[in-house]
Image (cartoon, grey):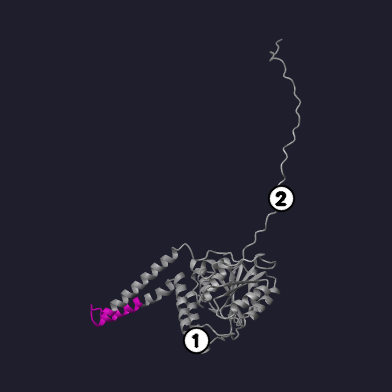
Amino acid sequence: MSEHPSTGPAAPVTERIPVDPPQTQPQPVTQPQPVTQPVNEPQAPMHPSDAAYLPAVAPTPAPRPGEPGHGKPYVTIVLPCFNEGEHVLQEIDRITEAMNSSEFTYEVLCIDDASTDNTLEVLHQASRDYANIRVMPFRRNGGSGTARRIGTQQALGEIVVWTDADMTYENERIPELVRILRDDPSYDQVVGARTTEEGTHKWARVPAKWLIRKIAEKLTNQTIPDLNSGLRAFRREVSLPYLRLLPPGFSCVTTITLAFLSNQHDVKYVPTSYAKRAGVSKFHFVRDAYRYILQVLRMVMYFDPLKVLMPPALWLVVIGVLKAVVDMVRHPFYFPASTVLLIVSGIMIGSLALLSDLVVRSRTGV
């Protein structure tokens, strides 16, 4: 029987004395501060030319309960104002009364487009009297299109509503337009289609607007009851890629309509009445009608250039070929310069149409 070798005398057992941990100064417990969104924080990338309209240092007052900065609203109503001091408060009261009686949280973003009257003072007073008013003053006049573009970029709401401050539109029906978007996700824009015309130069506006609307319907293959209504609601996220296309003037409403229709977004039209405007109209018939036509052609060219360029190209080629046949019968093997010019012009325009369509199809953005 073998024994394990001894490793030497056993080590003495020492008793472990518990040592108290070092005393540390208790650290104060800090509560996490709620992050509130500044009232003037941009919600979308802004072009430097747009940022130039805003004040260099925009005030950011602490939001009160019920104010837009305290909780993100569902609806933002963009209200451009230019020399509307006499009646803008009535319009604000009408809008807030309708929205307060609805189920939606909202903000009214009042944009003073460098007014020369007391509009800005009235808006600042309204912002103190109404909890849901946000005022954005411009340093220089940019036009209703610029105001709506920047207002949509700065909007906090998921749904953006465009309207005017001249007492012409049924702004008490804004909740109705918003409900359509909320209840039916297939629609991206709801337009208040006017059933009457009460603007200035009515004798000339009615036929001119009808002609422009028919051109737009032909080019978009869509029925458009009202091409340039100023009362509309749309999904902000859907509209953001198209904001850079908006011109500074009145044709911005035409542009947003054509942009949605040309890019396969469903638009719903709701019949509305149209009242005689308060104050002085800023619409200039000849200049603005010319811009409307150009904007319709520009927007269709932007999305589908073949519809604009290919028809005249084909007509020129067909007319040139028919004229060449007649010339051959009358004078064998003789083609006048006009015949050659017709055919060559048609081919050049057709080539430009195909090249433009190729550029549109290869575009990665909107």
Given contact means CB atoms under 8 Å apart, are the residues at marks 1 and 2 in contact? no
Residue 29, numbered circle: 2
Magenta portion: prevailing SS class: helix
The amino acid pointed to by label 2 is Val
Quarter of the image containing the N terminus? top right
In the depicted view, which residue is nearer to us: 103 or 140? 140
Q: Position of residue 43 (x, y in %)?
A: 57, 64
Give whichever of discs 1 and 2 has the lower sequence position: 2
> Dot 1 corresponds to which residue?
207
SS label for mark 2: loop
Q: Is residue 64 above or below residue 34?
A: below
The amino acid pointed to by label 1 is Pro
**Quadrant hosting residue 108:** bottom right
Q: Position of residue 250 (x, y in %)?
A: 51, 78
Left of 316 or right of it: where is 240? right
Left of 65 or right of it: where is 145? left
Q: Position of residue 85 (x, y in %)?
A: 60, 81
Q: Which residues are magenta?
A: 316-338
Q: Residue at x 70, y 52 (%)?
A: 30
